[in-house]
């Protein structure tokens, strides 16, 4: 049973949950004067200056234990009750439990609701949540493309809807909404008769969700809380996520002399050819002297084993979102990534630390034959719009066998 709350937040990934914490922190700062780690006043708006000091008496390498930040914790009408709708893969579930622990340490109520894993699970979850959704005055969602979240929005009467980042997909969400298109993930091709039939059957629910999320639609206020470069639609409020809570809670990190690589799930989503990806990682390792590879939570064990054997990299499977891992440290003085969310979020999380974030372009030749027509332009846009990063050319090493 979910405690009665005026604000409900629905999250399906560790990054979404982290960004709900960031959103709540920013809203508290806007509602009054937050307090910095040293007890001095910080201007409303949630912005922090460069070089935020470590939390007194707290190790930057730990992620557990209660928060002692003055002014932190969940209080007031803005404080959300967070409903976690976990996926089935073990890595995502493990990270979600860790971030949920941080949220509870901050004083938030976190409700774990299974909505997958069986034919009846979604319907049981909908039945359990519908009454709370109807009562909520504000609903925060992390993935507007999620079919389960779209189903939850159908009975919603909230006067305010907030979308927090689920990564670079936020850019595509705002763009599709502005064009009046149905909400569809950029890497999905939708090929096959079965997929088309399912989309047609689901079209009424998707259409209702799109109207709910359109500013002014059904007389609702819509806010997007994001680190991504998006142009707000008429009537939409866009609030910057500069990872103020993360910077106040952790770090600054100890820096190593080496370079860290950040993995991506572009192979797992069918966008990039596995052999091309492996060759590119090998070339980056040699060129930049990389020693560690931070795996994406969706990367397969087989792929990671092959990368380790081909490159000699230490494969690290983070138990928290990379923004928190990097902020706690230790972290390399240079972090190299392919086009992904972190090229937009890490420059905020690591402000003032001296870490350089670099992004390596994806060569069009790496794309698979089944990649979405949107893939090339979307990935180029992720790279071109990143701020405060070093841009690297695509690696042209021949594909491994």
Image (tube, rainbow, N blue to C red):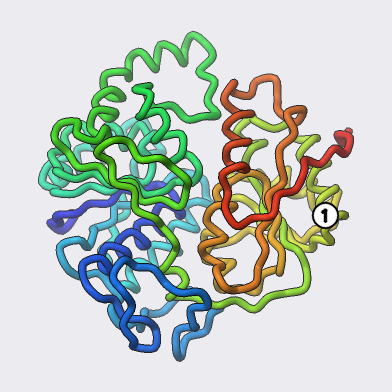
Among the 4 quarters of the image, the one containing residue 64: bottom left
* Above or below for 12 versus 334: above
User: From this viewpoint, is residue 123 visible?
Assistant: no
In front: 372, or 82?
372
Position of residue 353 relative to residue 259, above or below, is below
Question: Toward the viewer: 115 or 361?
Answer: 361
Image quadrant assignment for residue 106: bottom left
Number of marks present in the image shown: 1
Identified at 33% across, 59% down, the residue is: 23
Is 324 left, or right, of 154 in this rendering? Answer: right
The answer to which image quadrant residue 234 occupies is top left
Q: Label 1: state its secondary structure.
A: helix
**Does residue 167 appear in this view?**
yes
| Residue 271, x across and y down, in percent | 64, 30
x and y percentages locating residue 125 in the rendered image: 26, 40
Q: Which residue sits at x=45%, y=84%? A: 55
374, 330: nearer the viewer? 374
Residue at point 63%, 36% (across, down): 380
Residue under numbered circle 1: 285
Question: In the rendered image of this protein, does residue 98 appear above or below residue 83?
Answer: below
- The quadrant the N terminus occupies is bottom left
Task: State which quarter of the image contains the C terminus.
Answer: top right
> Residue at the spot x=51%, y=29% of the render?
186
Locate residue 255, reporting x and y percent: 68, 75
Q: Position of residue 10 (x, y in %)?
A: 30, 48
Q: Residues within 10 Å of mark 1 (few under 14, many from 20)?
A: many
Report the residue that reaches farthest toward the top: 193
Above or below, 349 against 234 in this view is: below
């Amino acid at each position: 049973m979910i405690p009665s709350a005026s604000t409900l937040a629905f999250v399906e990934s560790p990054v979404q949950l982290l960004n709900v914490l960031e959103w709540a922190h920013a809203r508290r700062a806007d509602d009054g004067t937050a307090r910095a780690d040293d007890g001095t006043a910080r201007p409303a708006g949630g912005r922090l200056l460069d070089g935020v000091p470590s939390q007194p008496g707290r190790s930057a390498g730990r992620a557990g234990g209660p928060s002692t930040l003055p002014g932190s914790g969940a209080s007031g009408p803005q404080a959300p009750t967070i409903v976690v709708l976990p996926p089935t893969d073990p890595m995502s579930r493990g990270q979600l439990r860790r971030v949920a622990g941080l949220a509870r340490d901050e004083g938030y109520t976190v409700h774990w609701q299974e909505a997958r894993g069986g034919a009846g699970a979604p319907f049981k979850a909908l039945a359990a949540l519908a009454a709370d959704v109807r009562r909520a005055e504000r609903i925060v969602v992390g993935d507007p493309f999620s079919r389960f979240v779209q189903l939850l929005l159908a009975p919603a009467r909230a006067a305010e809807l907030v979308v927090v980042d689920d990564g670079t997909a936020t850019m595509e969400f705002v763009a599709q909404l502005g064009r009046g298109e149905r909400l569809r993930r950029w890497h999905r091709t939708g090929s096959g008769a079965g997929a088309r039939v399912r989309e047609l059957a689901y079209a009424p629910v998707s259409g209702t969700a799109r109207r709910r999320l359109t500013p002014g639609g059904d007389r609702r206020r819509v806010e997007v809380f994001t680190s991504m470069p998006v142009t707000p639609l008429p009537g939409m409020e866009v609030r910057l996520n500069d990872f103020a809570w993360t910077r106040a809670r952790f770090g600054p990190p100890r820096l190593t002399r080496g370079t860290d690589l950040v993995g991506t799930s572009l192979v797992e989503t069918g966008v990039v050819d596995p052999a091309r990806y492996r060759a590119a990682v090998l070339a980056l390792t040699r060129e930049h002297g990389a020693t560690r590879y931070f795996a994406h939570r969706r990367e397969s064990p087989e792929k990671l084993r092959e990368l380790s054997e081909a490159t000699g990299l230490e494969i690290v499977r983070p138990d928290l979102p990379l923004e928190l891992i990097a902020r706690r440290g230790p972290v390399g003085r240079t972090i190299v990534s392919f086009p992904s969310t972190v090229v937009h979020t890490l420059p905020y999380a690591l402000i003032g630390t001296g870490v350089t974030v670099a992004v390596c372009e994806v060569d069009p030749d790496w794309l698979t034959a089944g990649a979405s027509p949107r893939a090339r332009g979307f990935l180029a846009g992720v790279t071109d719009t990143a701020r405060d990063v070093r841009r690297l050319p695509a690696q042209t090493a021949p594909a491994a066998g």
